[in-house]
Amino acid sequence: MTVGVALNPIDPTNQIEASVELAKEAADAGLRSAWFGQTFGADSPQLAAIVGREVPELQVGTSAIPVFGRHPLLVSSQAQTAQAATHGRYHLGLALGTKLLTEAGFGIPFERPIARLREFLTAIRQLNETGSADFHGELLTATTPIPARVPGAEPGVPLLVAAMGPQALRASGELADGILPYLAGPRALAEHIVPAVTAAAEAAGRPAPRIVALVHGVVTDDVDAVRATVTENLAFYEQVPSYARAIGLSGGRRAVDVAVIGDEKKVAAEVRRYRDAGATEVVFAGTEVAGAADRRRTWALLGELAG
């Protein structure tokens, strides 16, 4: 099982340089992959391309780019560029996004998200695999009157979706290479998420999907203080229906209830639970919450588990 980390420097002077330095540290600790979120700040495919080029020991990926406010032609160009820059080590993560950020940020209605996801996946698969597309959907059009292939990019950039709800899981199983569930604990994975996406992939005649579980966690002795901070940091996700559902299916009430906080023994046991629940890869997020010393301690453990 691959073990990686989501990189998010705290108050950096320069986010790009800080991300590269963290990635080097992660690679030295024995971790296998580095992932980058996408909001309205740094462009995650560019960041992944830079980090992947500077730190060739790591696989890199985005987790994840919302399909609202983007177009398959542009995202494919970004993904292929990152794939060429990293010589095949880039993984493209897509997401539905949220109603709040979509409508407040882009001024566009958050309507028919599953239909948009299906059309986006269909178009971008054509682009990533062949460098061309001739897709005409209800919500999207993607055609290539001139070639859209980036020389040096390997065909078929791995395509993952931050899917957790039944309809998104079905679309991802049919059209993507795997999923990036976040704040979904082992119980939700084993009983709901993994069976649903696997069944959809099998029905579509596709290979077994990758299950890249993003886990918010840290190794620390100051459990109460860290838990209080994480409770505040993750409160936003409790307002998003897909996350709230995953938290509930995991047996939690608050987002912090599915966070992994404790000593090495506890965290290692939880990583094994994710593996047993069907995760093919585990990526820890939020490891910076307790400071540099606990982050390094967390990465040292995860590096051992990756080895």
Image (cartoon, grey):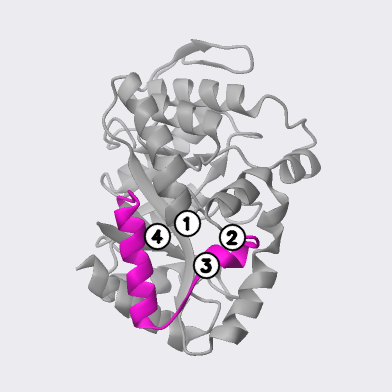
Dots 1, 2 in contact, CB < 8 A = yes
Of labels 1 and 2, earlier in sequence is 1
| Quadrant in the rendering for residue 267 | bottom left
Range shown magenta: 253-280
Mark 4 residue crowding within 10 angstroms, few (<14) / some (14–19) / many (20+): many
Q: Is residue 118 above or below residue 107?
A: above
Of marks 3 and 2, the one in the foreground: 2
Q: Nearer the viewer, residue 159 or 211?
A: 211
Q: Is residue 121 above or below residue 209?
A: above
Of labels 2 and 4, earlier in sequence is 2
Q: Which residue is mark 2?
A: 252
Q: Who's the residue at 46% across and 41% down the image?
A: 192
Q: Residue furthest left?
A: 307
Q: Is residue 6 visible?
A: no
Q: Residue 185 — which label?
A: 1
Q: CA distance from mark 2 to mark 4?
A: 20 Å
Mark 1 residue crowding within 10 angstroms, few (<14) / some (14–19) / many (20+): many
Dots 2, 4 in contact, CB < 8 A = no
Q: CA distance from mark 3 to mark 2?
A: 10 Å
Q: Is residue 1 above or below residue 11?
A: above
Of labels 3 and 4, earlier in sequence is 3
307 vs 45, left or right, is: left
Residue 71: x and y, percent? 57, 29
Q: Residue 283 — which label?
A: 4
